[in-house]
Amino acid sequence: MERNWTGDDEKSAFDDLLSARVPSRGALSNVLEEYELKALQSEHAAEQYAVRHTSNRKASSGWRDPKNKLQSEFSDTVHHVQDALHVFKERGVLHHTEYDSNIPAAVHGAPKTAEESKESLERLRRMGQFEAQDFDVVDNDVERETTLNRDHLDYLVEESWRWLLSFLIGVTMGMLAFLVDIVLQRLNSFKYTAVKTVVANHGGFWAPYMVWLVFTMGYSAMSAFLVTSFAPLGAGSGIPEIKTYLNGVHIKGLLGLKTLVVKMFSVTLSMAGGLIAGKEGPFIHAGGIVGGGIAGMGSRTITDLLHKYGYKRKAKASRKYGGYFRNDADHRDYVGIGTAAGVSCSFAAPIGGLLLSIEEGASFYSTSLFWRGFLATCTGVCTLHFLAQFHERPSEIMDARFGIRRDLGLYDDNIALYGSKFWYYIWELPIYVFIGCIAGALGGWFIKLNIHFTSFRAKYIPASNRWRRFGEVVFVAWLVATTWFIATYSSPCQNLPSKEQLSYYENSGEDQDIYAGVSGFDSRGLKFFPQLWCNSTQFNPHGQLFFNPLVQSMRMIVHFGETLPESITPEHIISSSLLLLWAVTIFCGMLFCFGIGAATGLFIPSLALGAAWGRIVGMLVRHMVGHHAISLPAYAAVGAAAQLGGVTRMTLSITVLVMEGTGALQLVVPMMLAVFVAKIVGDSVSMGVYDLHIKIRGAPVLLEAALESHQRMVSDKLSVGELMTTQMTALEPVMLVSKLEGVLRRCAHQAFPITTEVDKAFAANESFPLHGVIKRTQVLRMLKHRIGLLTHDGMSALPPAKTRIPKSQEERIELLDKLEQFPLKIRVKEEQEGILRDLTDEERHMYIDLRPFMQRTPFLVHANASLSRAYRLFRTMGLHHVFVGPPKPMVMGVITRKVRCCESHHGTC
């Protein structure tokens, strides 16, 4: 008898489910899930459970309907469950008191409390909103026939395009970085010049304060409006999203042209508005968009715009003009190259940018990809330097000295005496290790606090409410602007250094304005000693940090005074009290700004924070050992690198980036030690900030198994057969279009096995012959372009699959062009219904031949293989699914490494 459920009943059923401490991560077999569902004693509760507990399987080809589980006999279920419990108990994977009183209470791989269960179930629900990608290269009959008819010249042309596109990615990112720097310099100059003018003409607090607010809040409001109105994915740094994509998870709109435009304008306005933000993270996102777009040699956004205004042409280049790389694997590789070029151009550090892309971004990185990334980063930085020099002195471009300006440097390399400013004693190494400990603990504390800020935003300022997101940005901009202005206004005035020392302080060498983010001198011709409310013989010390762009203030902390000879005792250094005030305000500003509805990066704020307290540590050491000369710039540089490592948990790339950006090559050993220790201490406190936000969003990212001992334990002890889904929705090699239409509408699977025994595929625990696999997007493209349709009576023999393949190479390439996923990608949710609705009744009664277009060689593992083996396949190959075969498959031959080596060397062993 059907029961009428009330709201209280539903809540009670869900509460019962939570109190049952249901394990997460899918570490139970299907029979165990059946037992849990049966124990709930209701079909409704089972459906609620399925939505939350099985969302991580929605992407797999063939998730069984929870209602079917309840139809099994209770006695049989209990019997199977006892067997499953015995297996799990033997492996030490599951110990659960609710299932067997004899099992110990220590739980491995399962939540221990109802609150943890609720959190796990909610994360699994969010995971169901993502769709996994498949980076496996398509190998169907049409592709195979096309490949067999390619000549050597075609392969050479393709390889040439690979290098040319990498070059173009670097040039494009260099130009974007230059444009952002120029616009940011102009916007900042307008703001600071206007405030200085009001202070000089009117003085006081309110008039300059109101002008300050107009600029800061105006810039920030425009940044927020662009993001909240046009491209919500333009918010934040974009690093978690890019890392998620490169790991094999699709995020709709992440790599669109609109997102790129909004991201660039938003991060420029955010930095000009004084938000605690940097451009490095957004440039990683922008580089990924540029890399994917150039590789696809086309744009869906531009095509839509052309169609909107009546032009039927597609913004898509032919194969002749570089349209070779339109599969998922090539697109992923060029997105990775773009991210390397993006961070390289933002830091003007080509080697560090490439290493960051490898360390933090890519799950798979080959040597050839490394070489092309190397070309892109080198080209990008060279383009940036050329444009910057040409902008400053176009007539002297051939005589200009390149390579003397650093993105994180205050003076050019001709003036800065790095060898005499960056050094350390051997007894200081333990102190640098201590700095790493502080950085790791502080980074972990920041991430812990950020979790609460993120939870608050998710509850009260959701991304779906754009006006609240907009209001939050404006409020944060007001808060930061007010704090910065009060700190500057309340500063005591100090006398200027002597003219001799002033000439050293102010001698910055070649013009660095484009890197500083601001240009112009005050009325006395000074750049680093702001006058503001002081008289002509004094300066405002707080203004050196608080009345400057964030990146320029960080440069002041690390490099200020480097041009002074060692024989001269400096008359002015930035005080420890000012550095402490700066560090506290930066830390609080990072908490408020990271995660708001505007493009913001975390690299520069983290570097600025670490530089400030690192220099404070150096001052304490100098005070305790007064008879020794102590390098304060060294402590600031090491503190900056360690703090960035404590927040992001990156190591090698950060060390190289900071050394390239600051010129502190002499500090490689203490910097490596501090960054390494910061990572260890930080990992003991929390996850890295980007990994944490990936986890909060619920994206099914596969981390490197070797990095987590608990994950290795579970993966090694479980077999694939214990976790596989045995019911699958399959398609026939040749089937009625109307039947295919029904399958597409009834289920949400993104891939379908092809077999003549469809019933066996759907039936549990029955093996079936696998002919191949085909993606939903491929099927929809075939229906959209009416590919593969044929008239058949259903009784006579079908023609061979090869008869459906075009005879000429030109026709085959034209056919593949229609089936390419990039750049005009099929949007399943938006386009599927329209494609199916456009089918005529006559076409619905026709058959569709999937044989020439299906992937004939999908990846397959044995049922008794360890989960670790399947995990490595998923992560290294970037797979969407892996089929499970019987323990004893039929074998027809073997190929060895030596055979492959001989083939690759033209048959000479």
Image: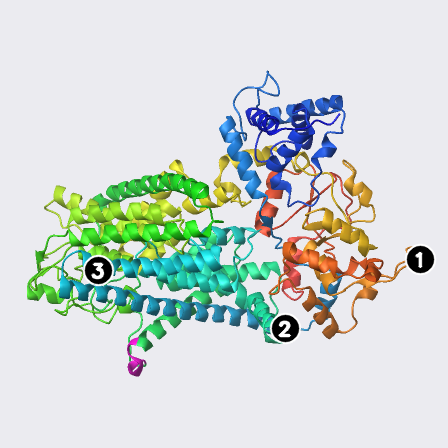
Residue 596 in picture, x, y percent from top left: 40, 50
Residue located beneath label 2 in the image: 319
Q: How is the image coloured?
A: rainbow
Q: Quadrant of the N terminus?
A: top right
Q: Residues within 10 Å of mark 2 (few under 14, many from 20)?
A: some
Secondary structure, mark 3, is: helix
Q: Position of 800 compared to 483: left or right?
A: right
On the image, which quarter does residue 489 sit in? bottom left
Secondary structure, mark 1, is: loop
Residue located beneath label 3 in the image: 419
Q: Position of 163 compared to 849: left or right?
A: left
Q: Residues within 10 Å of mark 3 (few under 14, many from 20)?
A: few
| Looking at the image, residue 717 lies above or below residue 291 | above
Q: Earlier in the sequence, mark 2 or mark 1?
A: 2
Main SS category, magenta section: helix
Secondary structure, mark 2, is: helix
Q: Earlier in the sequence, mark 2 or mark 3?
A: 2
Q: Quadrant of the C terminus?
A: bottom right
Residue 796 tag number? 1
Q: How many marks?
A: 3
Query: Going by the picture, which residue comes out furthest to the right?
Result: 796
Please name the amino acid that badge 3 sits on: Gly
On the image, which quarter does residue 127 sit in? top right
Bounds of the magenta segment: 392-397
**Mark-to-mark CA distance, 2 and 3:** 52 Å
Please name the amino acid that badge 2 sits on: Arg
Residue 763 in picture, x, y percent from top left: 78, 38
Which of label 3 and label 1 is nearer to you?
Answer: 1
Q: Position of 761 compared to 878: left or right?
A: right
